[in-house]
Amino acid sequence: MESLQDNAPLMILPMAKEIPAGAGEFRLPSTDQSFVQGSISTSVGPVPRVGAELTAGDLYGHFLVRWNIGRDHFTVEPGVYGLGDPAGDSPVLVTANYKMTFDLLRRAMVGRNVWILVLDTRGINVWCAAGKGTFGTEEMLDRIQASRLDEIVNHRKLIVPQLGAPGLAAFSIKKHAGFTIVYGPVMMGDLAEFLDNGHQATPAMRLKKFPFKERLVLVPVELMQGLQQGLPLIAFFMAAAGLAGPGSFVQASISQGLPPSFAVLAGIIAGTIITPLLLPWIPGRAFSVKGAVAALLIFVFGYTAFGAYSMDYSYLARLSWLLTALSIGSWFGMAFTGASTFTSLNGVRKEMLRAMPVQFAGIVAGIIIWGISVWSA
């Protein structure tokens, strides 16, 4: 077979956009990465060797990114890696360059000798990157060529996560690179059995469940992202109330600024904690509706518990709090579609087109009505 590097980089593809500079140029990942354990000598050069056991540093990194700390930089260099002592006939597993995904894959391959082809997904996991297009056909072809994978292995088969299928055109990869795509199981825990079974998946391996435990581990990052977006709005309510409300700045901030701030927190909690945890049981099919329902429940419970309804607030003020909580809860509930396999890319787009105008109108109306209530207090 003619080597890929003999062709102009990706010029064989009917591109709808300009080819990135450096696409297809030969490059291997650096061995100067904390998780790399030496190198494997190949005909194209030293390929970084990695192990299946995760270090304390790896696990600490996992903890931090679960809380959205340094998540954008928790990546590995794209390219080909060797786990164990792979040979020319060893399987090639394809994954994303989000380090947690990479780490979980190599941990699942303990005692195995495999090649791992890492695509540049901008630090996003396979499922989300496939939806965003970074785990895609162009990147796959670029990475195959840039790694000279056809010279490293003597077969033409790539094992790709099933959840990466939406981003790939397998026929194009076969046509232009000569590699056949084989979709592995949904869960990494089934990958070893899949390999032992001659790359055949059982029906159970094709099913993706989304149990409570998997939803629970996503809550910290969802919550932190929600707080990052919500805290500026809370600061606005507190400052505006202090400047426009009756009495001193501190008194007005507390009396007029705290209630809408609690509404913001209620929406964040509803969309980032309650919606993920109680997802199957909250009424509504759309995630935006589920988030709004959860926000309504928290709003009613919270403001009743704190006795806000018995305080001297106008109906306009209370309406503004409700609109704020519902809009924010709906927004963050809808945002959870990116973490769920319950949704499709087209379904998410349709929901966003329908829900975002309502959410925007709700939060704007809530702020305006709140401002009127403060001014007239």
Image (spheres, helix red, strand yellow):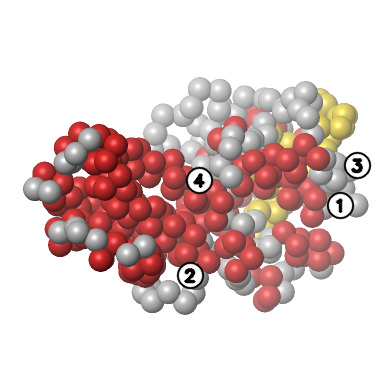
**Which residue position holds label 1?**
110
> How far from the left and from the top, in percent, is residue 122?
55, 36
Q: Which mark is residue 185?
A: none
Give the alpha-carbon distance from disc 4 to disc 2, as whole Å: 19 Å
Q: Under tag 4, what secondary structure?
A: helix
**Marks 4 and 3: which is nearer the front?**
4
Q: Which mark is residue 279?
A: 2
**Marks 1 and 3: which is nearer the front?**
1
Q: Is residue 307 left or right of residue 42?
A: left
Q: Which mark is residue 85?
A: 3
Q: Verify CB contact (< 8 Å) between mark 4 and mark 2.
A: no
Characterize the local packing of mark 4: few (<14), some (14-19) or many (20 or more) Cα atoms within 10 angstroms: some
Pointer 1 or 3: first along the chain: 3
Amino acid type indicated by mark 4: Met
Q: Under tag 1, what secondary structure?
A: loop
Amino acid type indicated by mark 2: Leu
> How far from the left and from the top, in percent, is residue 127?
55, 54
Characterize the local packing of mark 1: few (<14), some (14-19) or many (20 or more) Cα atoms within 10 angstroms: some
**Marks 2 and 3: which is nearer the front?**
2
Give the alpha-carbon distance from disc 2 to disc 3, as whole Å: 43 Å
**Which residue position holds label 4?**
224
Give the alpha-carbon distance from disc 4 to disc 3, as whole Å: 40 Å
**Depth check: 137 or 371 in front?**
371
Asked whether residue 355 is in view, the answer is: no
- Compared to 238, does 131 lie above or below? below
